[in-house]
Amino acid sequence: MASQSEGIQIRVNGSLCQLEVDSSRSLLSVLRTELRLTGTKYGCGAGECGACTVLVDGEAVRSCIFPAGHAHGRTVTTIEGLAQGGRLHPVQEAFLEAQAFQCGYCTPGMIMGAVSLLRKEPNPTELEIRRALADHLCRCGVYPRIIRAVQLAAAKMSK
Ligand code: FES
Ligand code: FES
C-alpha cells in the first residue's frame, strides 16, 4: 500500500506542531513517538479501554483509533497540557487527593475523560460519572476512588 505521508499541522497543548507523517497513523502513535508526549498510554489499541484518551477540540477521543490526519488544523490536549502556570488542573489535584490510582496506567485517560465530562456537566451525579467513565478500564479496580476524585474535582471547580 502506498504511503500517505503528508504535512499536517496540529496545535498540541498550545504549540503549533508541523509534522510529516502518514496521515492514517494513529494520533496516539504520533503523540508518543514524534512529539515524545508519552503521558498518553497505549492499552488495547482497539478503542476499548480508554487509556489513550485525549481531547480534540475539547472532545474526548480514543487516540489509538483516531487517524493523525483527522487532527489536522485542530487542537489536541494531552495530559501534559492540563497543568497551567505550574499548577495542576483541579482534576489532577483531585486524583492525587483521592489517591485514585494504583499502578497509574489508566490514570491519564481517566483524567482526560473526567475533564471532558466536567466541561459538559460541571456537577455530575454519581450515575453520570459512572456512565461517562464506563468504558475506561482500570485493571487495578480503583473505581470507587476514581468516582470520588471526579466528585472532588467538580466541587473544586465550582468554587
Ligand atoms: S489504547 Fe486506545 S482505547 Fe485502549
Ligand atoms: S490504576 Fe492501574 S489500571 Fe487503573
Image: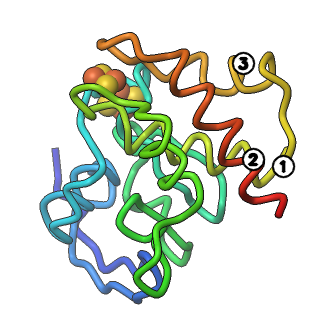
Residue 68: x and y, percent?
37, 58
Q: Disc 2 marks which amino acid? A: Ala
Is 98 placed left or right of 102 in the picture?
A: right
For the residues bearing labels 3 and 2, Cβ distance under 8 angstroms: no
Q: Which residue is mark 1?
A: 122
Q: Nearer the viewer, mark 3 or mark 2?
A: 2
- The answer to whether marks 1 and 3 mark residues whose Cβ atoms lie closer than 8 Å is no
**Residue sitting at x 35%, y 30%:** 101
**Residue annotated with mark 2:** 154
Label 3 within 8 A of ligand 1 by Cβ: no
Point 44% across, 76% down: residue: 13
The C terminus sits in image quarter? bottom right
- Residue neighbourhood size for the residue with mark 3, other residues' Cα within 10 Å, grouped as few (<14), some (14–19), many (≥20): few
Q: Is residue 19 placed above or below 118 in the rendered structure?
A: below
Mark 2 or mark 1, which is nearer the start of the sequence? 1
Along the line of sight, the residue nearer the viewer: 39 or 61? 39
Instruction: Tell me: 109 left or right of 20.
Output: right
Label 1 beta carbon within 8 A of ligand 2: no
Find out whether the residues at labels 1 and 2 contact each other: C-beta distance under 8 Å. yes
Above or below residue 94? Residue 130 is: above
User: In this orientation, does residue 33 appear?
Assistant: yes
Quarter of the figure with residue 138: top left
Q: Residue furthest front?
A: 97
Residue closer to the observer: 11 or 131: 131
Counting residues from the start of the chain, the first of labels 1 and 3 encountered is 1
Q: Which residue is mark 3?
A: 131
**Which quarter is ligand 1 in?**
top left
In the displayed structure, 104 sits above or below 27; it is: above
